[in-house]
Amino acid sequence: DTAVSQTPKYLVTQMGNDKSIKCEQNLGHDTMYWYKQDSKKFLKIMFSYNNKELIINETVPNRFSPKSPDKAHLNLHINSLELGDSAVYFCASSQGHSQPQHFGDGTRLSIL
Amino acid sequence: AQSVAQPEDQVNVAEGNPLTVKCTYSVSGNPYLFWYVQYPNRGLQFLLKYITGDNLVKGSYGFEAEFNKSQTSFHLKKPSALVSDSALYFCAVRDNYGQNFVFGPGTRLSVLP
């Protein structure tokens, strides 16, 4: 019974394409996040979102946009993919910002 | 802005020996501190946290961490390492003003049989 699930697990696509990664959590949490982990395993927060507020890391290009159809879902849309977008993207959720985050198993994005 | 340092890229320890993974931080105000572990091809898993209270925090799988305010450190420890503890360990901090988490660069722990 997966708590935070992401799809797809692997995504291989061409430069310039637009793609989406889906995330769902069944923990009843009110806050969700997207992270990018690069090839050196460095982890960087991209967005945090609850039903009241979207916090955007200012270094994230505006080609990336989170979309939340409801409290249990936070999808990531990426426009005009670039080679540097190749990474593993993790979704996470928590109950408020001070509680531990639960992570999905990641989506490995490879840009050809 | 907050920051986290993990001064060791790699820590090697023999099975059964105690282990320490170091973390120092910089944050405005009181810190919220976390340790996570990542196994290959998996997401991060929460180990323990410090928000307030006792400086020694006990967490999952026998891990513990000691908060030291004067040294701005939050080192992860375990009295007796297992081969299955081999993984990538991340320290993270959030300040009590903002909502931004910052993760350290990670420390790879190898426990040798």
Image (tube, rainbow, N blue to C red):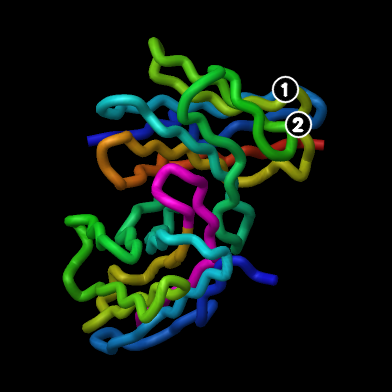
Q: Which residue is mark 2?
A: B81
As drawn, is B11 to the left or to the right of A34? right
Camera-nearest residue between A60 and B11: A60
Which is more N-terminal, label 1 or label 2?
A: 1
Does the CB distance between marks 2 and 1 fall below 8 Å? yes
On whether disc 2 and disc 1 are found on a single subunit, the reply is yes
Q: Chain of mark 2?
A: B
Q: Residue B84 at what x, y percent from top left?
A: 76, 45
Tell me the residue at 74%/23% (across/down). B79
Report crowding for label 1: few under 14, some 14 to 19, many 20 or more residues within 10 A (C-alpha): few
Instruction: State which chain disc 1 sits on.
Output: B
Which amino acid lies under the numbered mark 1 shown in the image of this protein? Pro
Q: Is residue B102 left or right of residue B66?
A: left
Segment colored magenta: A94-112
Q: Which of the labelled discs sits on residue A15, or is there none?
A: none
Q: Which residue occupies 28% across, 68% down?
A: A84
Image coordinates of residue B24 in percent, x first then y, are: 41, 25
Magenta-drawn stretch contains A103: yes
Q: Quadrant of residue A38?
A: bottom left
Secondary structure under badge 1?
loop
Residue for point 58% across, 28% down = B76
Q: Residue shown at 44%/28% (left/top)?
A: B7
Instruction: Tell me the amino acid under the disc marked 2.
Output: Ala
Identify the residue under disc 1.
B18
Q: Secondary structure at mark 2?
A: loop
Residue A61: percent from left, percent from top = 19, 67
